[in-house]
Image (spheres, helix red, strand yellow):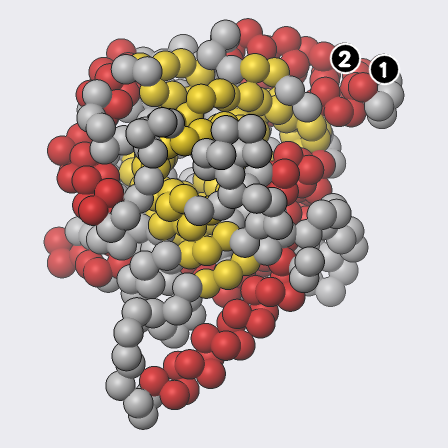
Amino acid sequence: MASRRGVRDLTLGVVGLALAVAAVVPPRGPAPTARSARTGGAAPATVDDAGQTSEGRTVAPPVASLAATSAGRDGPPGFAGSDVRPGRLEGDPVRRVVRASTPVSPRTGRRSLTIAVTGDILPHLPVQAAARRADGSYDFRPLLRGVGGPIRAADLALCHLEVPLTRDRADLSGYPVFGAPDQLADALADVGYDGCSVASNHALDRGVAGVGATLRALDRAGLAHTGTARSRREARRPPLYRVRGSRIAHLSYTYGLNGAVVPADRLWAVNLIDPRRILRDARRVRRRGADLVLVSLHWGTEYITTPTPSQRRLAGRLLASAAVDALIGHHAHVVQPVARRHGKVVVYGLGNLLSNQSAACCRAATQDGVVVRLGVRERRDGTLRIRDVAYVPTMVRHPQRRVVAVRRVLRRGGASGTYAAQLRASLRRTRRAIGDGATLTD
């Protein structure tokens, strides 16, 4: 099979040629679908700053040096209440995720697929420094390589990018107003992700211009995105992934923006949590042909493993609708339970995939995360349902700031002494937080 990067580069070349033709020839028929493929091997190798944000602070692009120190906070606690390729018109209807495996079960003859979802990607300045190379560029692949296996093993892999990206190496920053190198997007694509949710309390850290810069970076890397937008039309066209004969929709919303205000003439720039709006969007994407609708929610209270009453109420309301199939939670920075509401899956919190948080600033549990694998099966009536849920515990190792698959390292004898004790403690915390709503796996 061709490599993921090779297929993506070929796709971008074809899209570029199509754009050149489109400049002089009116388009006919539907927009072309994008293709991506996975490789089988690992990706090649080569703090938050202390304090709490105030609800009334203004958001402006900061100037910060990588030499600045960072501790580990993210933002205020609590919960209140499209696939677009470079230079192309927004709204391309479907992104195709190419897989070598058969789209139907040989035993039942019905469709089946797996979806992997992961926690917050929050690259504080020490994380950025760990990715910096001698030539001044950034390579985050070594930091993420430890979870490449379970990511690439899924038919569809979705991340949660919590911060804006920038190409300006002189303007990188951490907490409280983030700006990470755009090369992070390339690393996410290389490790095996197909797309990311991006609605978070940091989505407007660099204003509406920062939203555009982030989405352009994801476009260049070949990653779909949902939760922020550059136009009203893009906001109404979240990505649909065609996976093994099925169409999977991904929506994304956040509880707030750390006091930032979306401009009145660009209210579509960031999706805020509103149950009526979420259900309206879910019904719209159903009409576009979605077989399964996943909703990512940036919600909850930071550093608390128990879902809040607000989370539980919102989960019950959304999952009572036939338009929504599963909820995927972020923001708490610790793992929260997996449960069923109305017979559907809610992952209340996936913890941190990559951050600088630890017991030094927050809680030891902020080093923990999970890769949750959703097993999707076709029912007799032809509809899809999530039948089983499994999880791979992860931990960010310090001071290397590298993500590791906890059980894999322990089983292979790759840890001893203090490191092994940290892994075992992380595994205990994660198992306790997840509860009995998902199955532990490697």
Secondary structure under badge 2? Answer: helix
Q: Are marks 1 and 2 in contact (CB under 8 Å)?
A: yes
Q: Is residue 326 left or right of residue 260?
A: right
How many C-alpha atoms fall within 10 Å of the one at disc 2: few (<14), some, or many (≥20)? few
Q: Which residue is mark 1?
A: 417
The image's mark for residue 274 is none
Quadrant location of the C terminus in the rendered image: top right
Q: Who's the residue at 46% across and 79% down the image?
A: 16
Separation (CA) of disc 1 from disc 2: 6 Å
Q: Who's the residue at 20% across and 59% down the image?
A: 232
Within the image, what quadrant is residue 148 found in? top right
Check disc 2 and give the amino acid type. Answer: Ala
How many C-alpha atoms fall within 10 Å of the one at disc 1: few (<14), some, or many (≥20)? few
Q: Which residue is mark 2?
A: 421
Quadrant location of the N terminus in the rendered image: bottom right
Q: Is residue 67 left or right of residue 433?
A: right
Q: Nearer the viewer, residue 246 or 181?
A: 246
Q: Nearer the viewer, residue 409 or 25?
A: 25
Check disc 1 and give the amino acid type. Answer: Gly
Q: Is residue 153 left or right of residue 420?
A: left
Q: Is residue 101 visible?
A: yes
Secondary structure under badge 1? Answer: helix
- Where does residue 65 sit, x and y in percent of width and height? 57, 53
- Where does residue 142 sit, x and y in percent of width and height? 72, 46
- Where does residue 36 sit, x and y in percent of width and height? 54, 58
- Where does residue 269 sit, x and y in percent of width and height? 25, 53
Q: Who's the residue at 51% across and 72% down the image?
A: 12
Q: Who's the residue at 62% across and 24% down the image?
A: 392
When the figure is inspected, residue 88 is found, relative to residue 58, above or below; the finding is below
